[in-house]
Image (cartoon, helix red, strand yellow):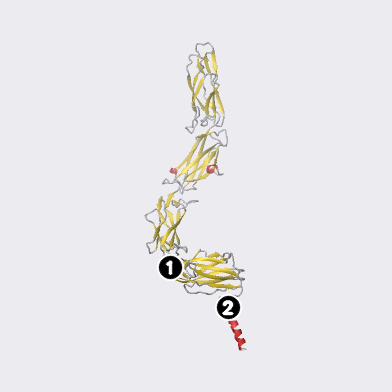
Amino acid sequence: MVKLFKALTASLLIAILAACGGGGGSAGTPVQGGGTGTGGTGTGGTGTTANGQIVLSLSDSSGAASNVLTAAGLTAKATATDSTGAPAKNIVVTFTLDSVIAVLSPISGTALTDANGVAQISLKPGAGASTGAGTLTASATVTGTTAVTTTATYTVTSATITPSAINFTSAVPADKSIVLKGSGGNGRTEAALLTFTVVDSTNAGIANVKVNFSLPTTNAVTLGAASGISDSTGKITVTVNSGATPTTVRVIATIDGTAISALSDTVTVTTGQPTQTAMSVSRVKSDIEGIDFDGETNSVTVSMADQFGGVVANGTQAVFTTNAGAIIGDAGTSDTSRCLTVNGTCSVTWRSQNPRASVVTVLVTSANATQTLTSGTFFINSGSHAQFSTIPVFDFSTSCAPQTINFTVTDENGYILPTGSAVTIENLTNSTVTAYPTSIPEPSTAGPEATSVQLTVAPPGTCSPAAATVVSVKPVVVITTPKGTRSTKQLTLNYHGS
């Protein structure tokens, strides 16, 4: 009986110990494994439930088991298996720390198990002056809804986390260019974010290090903060806010209490709001043949700069209006009447259609923080049908010497004909007639304008004032527009001869 009682007692004690230590627990109750160990032994822990198990271990950069956290960091591996002992694949393991003397990388503290059921994460020292011991916890739901949790301890000493450098890392915006204060908007920023990284001798980031910021000279910018603390990856960001004056600036970042510093790349403050005096509008063609035709086009461009002559920020809006025809925005690509600047300029396409006017006016409107800006241009909308002034009869009854006369020509509304319209002579009948100019030039005014054409006429070689016979020749002046419309005017040449 005594032997039986001792055997039952031993069995009961083993069962109690198994429930309290690293052994199995009842389903639905996470059981945390033990194993705190000592520095340098690479201790870990095991957590087990009826749904699975997690084994947590720590190792140094060489892969050897260790729980001493140096600047090189430690790797924490959590190996998850299900209730059958098979690897638990593609489950999320969450790692947490109980102290700021260390930080996790990635900072999310989560990792996914691989085909072997292993999820791993890195530990790095935290604050430069913080030492001591801490605990890392790993937790995951292997199957079902019951979480499995286990822990491992580590130690940090001050000698392992001394910063050795601070590096300039990045800038936002990437082109390091910001606009003048008050000029921000869609696609324009008045602030640059400069990021530095505090690193140790192995170029590993160090968290919780104070960094001071300063400007090398007096600049028309302000810093968002005079100092800050590096994050878990050693990074720290400072904001540079623009002022009202164009300038360039570089920021100095210095690790507090040391001479360790870094200089940022140059940030440029150049682009401001448009001003009335730096706004101009131009068009490609001085006239178009649009009175009698739809769909003839002209390109109209606006150029804008700020008060210092710097081009305005990309995306500055310009709205176009016209007294005739229609405006197609963004260089003829959008169903708007506006365009957005790129490098300080943008254009729209004007198209001929109803309503029509002989002088087309295009106005452009933009704005800055305090006023509306307006500028404009004009061009002639020419008709295609020529109107001729009176051309006298050429009379060679007393002399056969060449004669020169002038006449004028306009479109049907009294404005200049389309530029490039050809002036030719037909039906010469052995006479000689030359015209100058041979094509209609560009308009020179915004109002009605006639083109003066000079004709030099010589009768045929048979001309003789002594001859009794009067011969009449009927040459024709022809004006042909670029669209192919022909207008004619008959000449009369009378001479004596055969």
Above or below, 419 against 369 in this view is above
The answer to whether residue 337 is seen in the rendering is no
Q: Classify residue 11 by image quadrant.
A: bottom right
Label 1 neighbourhood size at 10 Å, few (<14), some (14-19), many (20+)? Answer: some
Above or below, 273 against 149 in this view is above
Q: Residue furthest bottom?
A: 1
The answer to whether residue 495 is seen in the rendering is yes
Secondary-structure class at tag 2: helix
Instruction: Please say if the residues under marks 2 and 1 sit with CB atoms less than 8 Å apart.
Output: no
Above or below, 10 against 153 in this view is below
Between disc 2 and disc 1, whose residue precedes?
2
Residue 173: mark in rendering: none
The quadrant in which the C terminus is found is top right
Given the image, on which type of amino acid does mark 2 rest? Ala
Label 2 neighbourhood size at 10 Å, few (<14), some (14-19), many (20+)? Answer: few
Q: Determine the CA span between mark 2 and mark 1.
A: 39 Å
Whole-percent x, y for residue 347 in the image: 51, 42
Whole-percent x, y for residue 394 in the image: 51, 18
Whole-percent x, y for residue 133 in the image: 46, 72
Q: Mark 2 sits on what residue?
A: 18
As rendered, which of 406 and 331 lies closer to the eye?
331
Whole-percent x, y for residue 268 in the image: 42, 51
**Left or right side of 488 for 70:** left
Q: Mark 1 sits on what residue?
A: 160
Total count of labels: 2
Secondary-structure class at tag 1: helix
**Left or right side of 14 for 188:** left
The quadrant in which the N terminus is found is bottom right
Given the image, on which type of amino acid does mark 1 rest? Thr
